[in-house]
């Protein structure tokens, strides 16, 4: 189209515009998306084709039938009964539970340590704040895998043999692990558990009542002491009333190793320590950021109202800081869970090490095994983000 | 009577100088004083022997463990193998090639990092498009009279750097496309981007590396074989582009709506408004985020040892089990930790500074 006939052919331009569909954003978008779908489909098809022909060549049958085959290898630590004669399907659950175990314990420890470090970094005491800063800056800038190696190979692998174990309070620490005395509940110990859960329930009810009363009358209730008393006091009373139905199973050195009690394998200790120490550094920064995000005016207003420091922290600072802290905190929890897969480097029998490691190598069912492993982590991360969205919508600032 | 201004008294000696500082910061009340004394005691009892071990009683050079006689750290273990830790099994005559590659990269990055250098755009273009080609021929060889060095000989710190740098640079364009896709109004494009991003962000890097090393060979027809390094790189790039996309999305969201509307009002097409209006502003905001993902990736490159590549951690790990030098793993790990720490701490400081500098706002 030349410049001269442009003004005269306005109507024809509109007409031709409808014929040149690529100038219509909607149609262009549609075209583009169809192309994307076709491209993806072609890509997937070629992958599936190649995979099928490759598998055929290697003589690997696809499908999940291998899950029912006998595994034939032992696993170092298992929360459910497991022997070498169990199936590959069971190794999946053994690994999964071990992952959950180290993740949950790591999350608890990292949260506690992280909160202390984060608050400590804001301390007015120069020494405390500097120690916390140095800790954070050192441990979050060193790869986690290196920290796991350090704890495992340098610290725990160089411990003395069982005969020269380090002993403290009836526990033994040696190169094979940590041996703790195990309390075993006797007859009637179940009552203690019942009382414990009853205490939890009662605390919850009491808390609701106390909150309601405070909203109506403004009177505060000493919830902390009441709660502690209910949760720990009740079972303790029951324990003594039942005549202390508990024995302790002490680890005893027999032959070359200890028998009895609880055994904590060094692989677990190394992984748990490294995960805790590494993640705590990140949690500390999140906590610090959350506390700093509460405007200073809030603190001043609380002081002006005459609230004591402890109540200022509990009722003014923490609720507002938690709003900022929780979302990144949950994503750190997720990171810790994903990072626990580094267990495979030191042989802690987690999901990746047992299932995507030994089981995969023995069966050669790469696709199914990797798919199942990834599905576990994906589910966890989707659940986490669902929780986060729910929390955000509940706690989001409602502006008036 | 004479009214006269008296000379001002100095502040009480307990509030100024060293004494005042000590009182304010360490001994402001009983609780604080106890904490200070306790922590101080622990620090002295811990740090003293550690320093003694690392510096005073240490041996720095020697060809065998026999040189370590002082009873402290045996740094000879490190200095003796420094070349291997830095260059892996690369032929010694080719060290200059690695040095040149890294120097070129360092120079380009320094040029872009320093605030008032001209021609930043050209340097960025060079780093993103021309430098990778030069780097490939320098490291791998096969042309310009350089002999081929197979990737299984690459290792040490240089391999760590290669993995991290290629990972971040190659993930960049994918990340940009995915971020734009996630903000797109086309439902299929958006769904694809969301699924891609959430999938890779939801799985641990190890499973990605496992997948790349076990499943990738199954996905392509038999004639094509992937190098081990290339497989790891593909895994890292797939993984990293998802994280990159989220950083870039954050930058895009930080641009006020008015900028988009102004670009539309000027009649710019989508790509023009992105390239000329949005991206230049957003990229500036993204740099701290990009540096942070780079730090995470840099630390994560150590995972490649699980699929059998010899990065700096893997090489030290294998040196630890050398029967001639048994029992020096502590020195080895401290050395690797120090190397990683220097890089990561330096970069995080840089990104913090940048964040402060960019906080000028609109």
Image (cartoon, grey):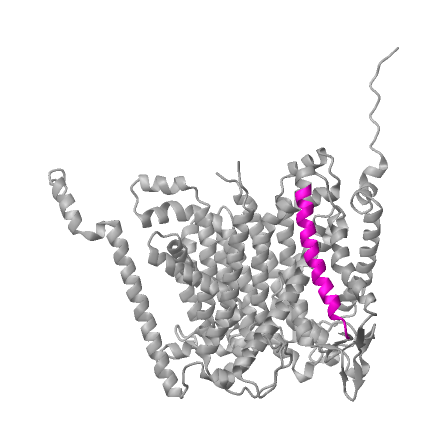
Which of these two is toward me, A382 or A215?
A215
Q: Is residue B246 left or right of residue A252?
A: left
Residue B179 drawn above or below residue B86: above
Q: Quadrant of the N terminus of chain B?
A: top right
Residue at image location 69% in from the left, 72% down from the top: A269
- Tell me the magenta residue range: A186-213
Q: Is residue B283 above or below residue B60?
A: above
* Residue furthest top as drawn: B1
Whether residue A79 appears in magenta in the rendering, the answer is: no
Front residue (pair B296, B84): B296
* Residue at figure coordinates x 49%, y 63% from the top left: B201
Given residues A342 and B105, the one toward you in this image is A342
In the displayed structure, does residue B208 sit left or right of residue B12?
left
Say whether residue A232 is visible: yes
Horizontal and vertical percent position of residue B141: 43, 74
Q: Quadrant of residue A51?
A: bottom left
Look at the magenta stretch and give its main secondary structure: helix
Q: Can residue A201 be found in the magenta stretch?
A: yes
> In the rendered view, does B116 fall on the left or right side of A167?
left
- Residue at 59% x, 73% y is A97
Report which quarter residue A63 is drawn in. Answer: bottom left
Q: Quick check: can you spot residue A117?
A: no
Q: Residue A370, how many percent across, how many down? A: 47, 75
Farthest-out residue, right: B1
Question: How far across and down, in percent of the image, does residue A49 sit?
Answer: 33, 78
């Amino acid at each position: 189209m030349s410049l001269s006939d442009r003004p005269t052919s306005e109507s024809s331009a509109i007409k031709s515009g409808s014929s040149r569909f690529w100038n219509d954003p909607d149609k262009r978008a549609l075209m583009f998306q169809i192309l994307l779908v076709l491209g993806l489909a072609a890509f997937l098809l070629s992958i599936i084709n190649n995979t099928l022909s490759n598998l055929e060549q290697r003589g690997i049958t696809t499908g999940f039938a291998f899950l029912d085959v006998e595994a034939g290898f032992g696993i170092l630590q298992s929360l459910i009964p497991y022997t070498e004669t169990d199936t590959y399907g069971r190794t999946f659950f053994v690994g999964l539970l071990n992952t959950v175990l180290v993740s949950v314990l790591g999350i608890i420890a990292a949260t506690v340590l992280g909160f202390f470090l984060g608050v400590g970094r804001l301390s007015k005491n120069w020494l405390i704040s500097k120690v916390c800063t140095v800790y954070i800056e050192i441990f979050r800038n060193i790869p986690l895998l290196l920290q796991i190696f350090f704890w495992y190979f340098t610290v725990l692998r160089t411990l003395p043999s069982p005969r020269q174990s380090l002993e403290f309070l009836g526990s033994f620490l040696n190169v094979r692990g940590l041996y703790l005395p195990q309390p075993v509940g006797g007859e009637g110990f179940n009552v203690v558990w019942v009382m414990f859960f009853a205490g939890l329930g009662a605390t919850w009810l009491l808390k609701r009542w106390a909150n309601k009363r405070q909203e109506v009358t403004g009177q505060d209730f000493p919830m902390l002491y009441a709660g502690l008393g209910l949760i720990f006091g009740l079972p303790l009373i029951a324990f003594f009333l039942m005549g202390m139905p508990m024995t302790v199973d002490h680890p005893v050195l027999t032959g070359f190793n200890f028998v009895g009690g609880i055994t904590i394998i060094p692989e677990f200790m190394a992984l748990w320590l490294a995960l805790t120490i590494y993640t705590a550094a990140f949690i500390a920064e999140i906590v610090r950021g959350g506390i700093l995000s509460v405007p200073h005016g809030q603190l001043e207003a609380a002081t002006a109202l005459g609230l004591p420091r402890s109540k200022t922290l509990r009722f003014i600072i923490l609720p507002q800081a938690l709003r900022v802290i929780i979302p990144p905190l949950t994503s750190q929890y997720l990171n810790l869970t994903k990072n626990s897969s580094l267990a495979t480097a030191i042989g802690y029998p987690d999901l990746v090490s047992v299932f995507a490691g030994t089981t995969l190598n023995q069966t050669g069912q790469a696709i199914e095994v990797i798919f199942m492993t990834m599905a576990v982590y994906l589910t966890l991360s989707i659940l986490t983000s669902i929780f986060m969205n729910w929390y955000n919508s509940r706690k989001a600032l409602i502006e008036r | 009577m004479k009214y006269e201004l008296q000379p001002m008294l100095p502040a009480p000696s307990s509030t100024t100088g060293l004494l005042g500082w000590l009182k304010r910061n360490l001994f402001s009340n009983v609780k604080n004083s106890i904490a200070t004394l306790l922590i101080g005691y622990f620090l002295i009892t811990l740090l003293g022997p550690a320093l003694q071990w690392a510096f005073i009683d240490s041996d720095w050079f020697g060809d065998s463990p026999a040189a370590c006689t002082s009873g402290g750290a045996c740094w000879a273990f490190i200095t003796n193998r420094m070349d291997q830790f830095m260059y892996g099994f690369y032929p010694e005559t080719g060290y200059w090639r690695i040095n040149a590659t890294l120097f070129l990269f360092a120079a380009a990055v320094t040029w872009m990092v320093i605030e008032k250098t001209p021609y930043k755009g050209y340097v960025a273009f060079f780093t993103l498009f021309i430098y990778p080609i030069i780097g490939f021929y320098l490291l791998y060889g096969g042309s310009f009279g350089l002999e081929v060095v197979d990737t299984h000989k690459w290792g040490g710190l240089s391999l760590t750097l290669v993995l991290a740098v290629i990972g971040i640079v190659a993930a960049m364009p994918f990340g940009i496309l995915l971020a734009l896709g996630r903000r797109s109004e086309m439902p299929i494009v958006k769904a694809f981007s969301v699924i891609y991003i959430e999938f890779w962000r939801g799985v641990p890097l190890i499973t990605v590396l496992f997948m790349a090393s076990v499943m990738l060979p199954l996905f392509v027809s038999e004639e094509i074989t992937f190098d081990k390094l290339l497989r790891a790189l593909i895994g890292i790039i797939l993984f990293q582009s998802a994280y990159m996309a989220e950083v870039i999305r954050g930058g895009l969201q930080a641009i006020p709506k008015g900028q988009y509307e102004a670009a539309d009002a000027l009649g710019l097409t989508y790509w023009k408004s992105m390239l000329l209006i949005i991206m230049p502003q957003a990229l500036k905001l993204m740099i701290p985020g990009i540096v942070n993902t780079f730090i995470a990736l840099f630390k994560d490159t150590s995972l490649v040892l699980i699929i059998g590549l010899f990065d700096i951690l893997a090489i030290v790990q294998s040196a630890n089990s050398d029967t001639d030098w048994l029992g020096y793993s502590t020195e080895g790990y401290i050395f690797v930790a120090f190397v990683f720490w220097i890089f990561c701490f330096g970069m995080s400081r840089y990104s913090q500074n940048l964040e402060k500098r960019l906080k000028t706002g609109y």
